Image: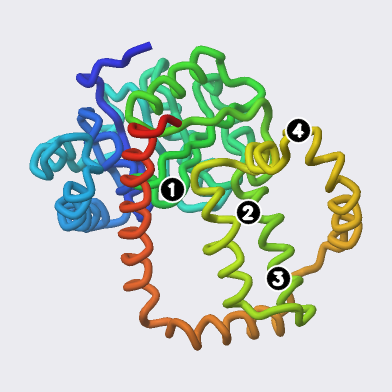
Amino acid sequence: MSISTDEKIAVVGTGLVGRAWSIVFARAGFPVSLYDPVDGAVEQALQLVEELLPELAQEDLLGGNSPDQVKARLTSAPTLADALAGAMYVQESAPERLEVKQELYRELDQLAEPNTVLASSTSGIPASAFTEGLANRQRCLVAHPINPPHIVPLVEIVPTPWTDAKVIQKTKALMSQIQQLPIQLNREVKGFVVNRLQGALLAEAFKLVEDGVCNVTDVDAAIANGLGLRWSFIGPFETIDLNSAKGVRGYCEMLGPLYYELAQEQADPRPWSEALVNEIDRQRREKLPVEHIGTRQVWRDQRLAKLVNAKKQADQKLGE
């Protein structure tokens, strides 16, 4: 399924995620209408996007477009109705509060044309929680990006129990067309896939620090300089498949009992206590004062951009 780039995209909510989405759609050739109820938010978002585009062009992350070409496809909508007028697809990136999304989706459902897809960027709230009572609820689903989506391509497609199959198909096709990488969940689950995997890792990371096994820096190093290097291009199942001459079966025969013992030790969910959070924060602040977090975020995004570009070149040379 190919979608004409004459079709309009509406981005509702222009914070960090919303403005990143606007880049993703615009660099793929779509006209994008941006709306945010906060005064001046869209103008600020457009300014930040304009400042970011030359750097993305240097990393070949504008799909062959110039910064001016991408910028020209972005327009500010004075009202929600204006943003939705003629839109084929809506990417909602409003605050992560259920009551906010419930109210917003009532408006979206009333104002958008009946066939317009309504997709939420929510990180963990199932769309059924804020779309159940809508007249056109079958066109609603989650399209959850990984931050920042203009650099990290994965998108989790999470339908509600009533999402129309054609809506899922159209959303996946759109994501593929704009060079994002969609994965589809078969049913709603709290936190979706990425945050559930990240949550399991964070739970163990917090325990290792709390139990005095190692410090925060060493936990981070174990991922950044160990597991993360492999995980940047292959996932956990392929990792274990390649770590045995007999593949997954051989790996499980060899190490399955060990992992079962570890799982029994790890089956101890603990709240992140104030004392533990304070200690982890103290160690991080020794490495990075809080006033420098913004600068480090820029550094992170620059590193991610170079990594994504390197992966693209490696895929072209070596295959995926």
Label 3, on which residue? 206
Q: Do the residues labelled 3 and 2 touch (CB within 8 Å)?
A: no
What amino acid is labelled 2 in the image?
Gln
The numbered mark, 3 or 2, whose residue comes first in the sequence reads 2
The numbered mark, 3 or 1, whose residue comes first in the sequence reads 1
What amino acid is labelled 1 in the image?
Ala
Point 63% across, 37% down: residue: 238
The numbered mark, 3 or 4, whose residue comes first in the sequence reads 3
Label 1, on which residue? 94
Point 33% across, 21% down: residue: 88
Give the mark toward the camera: 1 or 4: 4
Q: Where is residue 193 in the image (x, y as percent from the top left)?
A: 63, 41
Q: Distance between the residues labelled 3 and 1?
A: 30 Å
Within 10 Å of the Cα at label 4, are there few (<14), some (14-19), or many (20+) other Cα atoms?
few
The numbered mark, 2 or 4, whose residue comes first in the sequence reads 2
Label of residue 73 in the image: none
Left or right side of 156 for 92: left
Q: How far apart are marks 3 and 4 (CA)?
A: 34 Å
Label 2, on which residue? 198
